[in-house]
Amino acid sequence: MAVATIIASDGDGGVYSGDDGNDLMFSGLGSETMDGGTGIDTIDHTVWDGAYTFNMPTGLNSFGGEIYLNFEIAKMGDGNDTVAGNNEDNTIFGGLGNDILEGGNGIDKLSGGIGNDTITS
């Protein structure tokens, strides 16, 4: 039986890897690489309240030096976020702000939160 892992960035960069369970990872404010691994994994970006772009298929985002791979669930902060889902069944929470959420090719659940959001599947 796979065990879920909770990992929080220390904000000083680094490489963080989840296990084969359903992992929860919290991004920090420094350059970092986070890999959810197998399972249904969550990346929590709520520490950042500015505008943020996150491309789930590539792991790339608004800040060079940060990469987030193999996540199915994304929780965003209170900025005007743009998130592109991957081929998995994604759940994306936009938080406050005027978000643009695109689900990708899976069976997706998208929630923009409070704001003037654009949601496509």
Image (cartoon, rainbow, N blue to C red):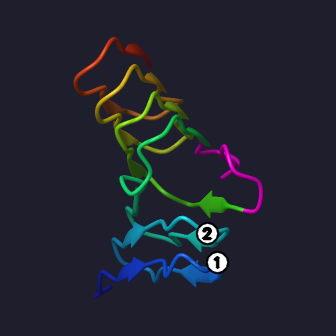
Identify whether 39 is placed above or below 42: below
- Residue 43 occupies which quadrant of the picture? bottom left
Q: Residue at x 57, y 81 (%)?
A: 16
**Numbered circle sitting on residue 13:** 1
Identify whether 9 is placed above or below 117: below
Disc 2, SS: loop
Q: Residue at x 48, y 79 (%)?
A: 18
Q: Which residues are magenta?
A: 55-65
Q: Amino acid at mark 2?
A: Gly
Q: Amino acid at mark 1?
A: Gly
Q: Tell me residue 74's x, y (percent).
A: 40, 48
Q: Tell me residue 59's x, y (percent).
A: 66, 52
Q: Is residue 10 left or right of residue 23?
A: right
Q: Which residue is mark 2?
A: 30
Rounded to the nearest angstrom, the CA distance separating label 2 from label 1 is 5 Å
Q: Main secondary structure of the magenta part?
A: loop
| 57 in magenta | yes
Disc 1, SS: loop
